[in-house]
Every structure is written in C-alpha cells, then in structure tokens.
Image (cartoon, rainbow, N blue to C red):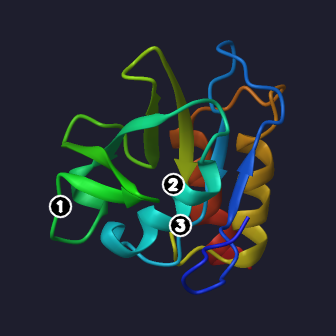
Amino acid sequence: MTDTTTMAPVRLRMDPEPSRTTLLDGAWWPRTTDAVAELPALLAALKDLRGEITHVLLNTAEWDLPHPRRAAAGRRAVRLGWYTSQPAGLVTIMIDFGRDRFDLLVVPPDASRASAGIALDAAADATDRRRTPELLAQIEHSGQAG
C-alpha cells in the first residue's frame, strides 16, 4: 500500500480477519502530526478494505492545526470529526455512514522503529487484548530504552 503522490509506503498493519470482537483492528504509524498531509495516504490504503469510508474521528489535541472538516479520498471527500473525547492514540474509521467501524492505534510519529513495529504487530493481532493506553505506554517505554 503506497501513497500515490509521494510513493512513500503507508505504515499500516491491519488484522487480516475483520472482527467486532477485537479491541483494535490494526495500527497506523504516520510520519507527522499533520492530518492534512497524512490522512489522504491512509484513506487511499484503506480504500475498499471494508466498504466506503464516510467519516474519520480524531483526537483534537494530537494533530496539528488546521482541523479541516473533510479530507481527500480519491475523487471524493471523507468527513472528519475532531473531538476532545476521542481516546488518545486512536483513530476511528466509520464505514457506510456508521453501519460499521474500525479502530486503529495511532503510533506516535517519533516512536522508534523497534517500538513502533511491536505496537503495529500487537494492534493487528486479534489475540492481543491490550488496549490503546497500554500499547502507547509500551511505545514510550521502548522508545526511551532503545
């Protein structure tokens, strides 16, 4: 999966078997906290994965300004929701106008390659029952140690 504009690979790992019984459906490791720059590549990578993406929910404090209301998704736009109540380190992708959704751990851009890899794998593993705060804490600890 690549961003067709820059040809940089999207750092995304998803559980290959979608399930509503998992805590997380995968993880995304953006290169920056600039949602305007990062979201189009993520949306392109997720295109047609589970249906039409209609909304993306993000934590206001984790992303640089501006906080636009829409992001490019090919020839159309996806609505963005910016919430202080959205859990830290989580982006929620809404499918088909709320009929389904999936949750992605957002690995901090400045995470070390080793700790990011561990978090990406854990979030995409249906048997891993850790929640976002636990995985984020591991990233911080691993990033400092290595």
Residue 44 in the image: x percent, y percent? Answer: 57, 58
Say whether marks 2 and 1 touch (CB < 8 Å).
no
Task: Work out whether 17 lies above or below 90.
Answer: above
Three-letter amino acid code at the position of disc 2: Leu
Task: Work out whether 73 lies above or below 56.
Answer: below
Q: Nearer the viewer, residue 74 or 133?
A: 74
Residue 146 in the image: x percent, y percent? Answer: 74, 79
Left or right: where 141 falls relative to 78:
right
The disc, 2 or 1, on the residue closer to the chain's N-terminal end is 2
Task: For label 2, count other residues whose C-alpha is less than 10 Å away and answer few (under 14), some (14-19) or many (20+).
Answer: many
Three-letter amino acid code at the position of disc 1: His
Residue bearing mark 2 = 43
Secondary structure found at label 3? helix
Measure how far apart labels 2 and 3 are at the Cα level. Answer: 5 Å
- Residue lying at 34% horizontally and 66% vertically, measured from the top left: 35
Say whether marks 3 and 1 touch (CB < 8 Å).
no
Measure how far apart labels 2 and 1 are at the Cα level. Answer: 16 Å
Task: Work out whether 144 lies above or below 63.
Answer: below
Residue bearing mark 3 = 41
- Asked where in the image residue 119 lies, by quadrant, the reply is bottom right
Q: Nearer the viewer, residue 108 or 96?
A: 96
Say whether marks 2 and 3 touch (CB < 8 Å).
yes
Secondary structure found at label 1? loop
- Residue lying at 23% horizontally and 34% vertically, measured from the top left: 85
Task: For label 3, count other residues whose C-alpha is less than 10 Å away and answer few (under 14), some (14-19) or many (20+).
Answer: many
Residue bearing mark 1 = 67
Measure how far apart labels 3 and 1 are at the Cα level. Answer: 17 Å
Query: For the N terminus, which image quadrant?
Result: bottom right
Residue 124 in the image: x percent, y percent? Answer: 76, 41
Three-letter amino acid code at the position of disc 3: Ala
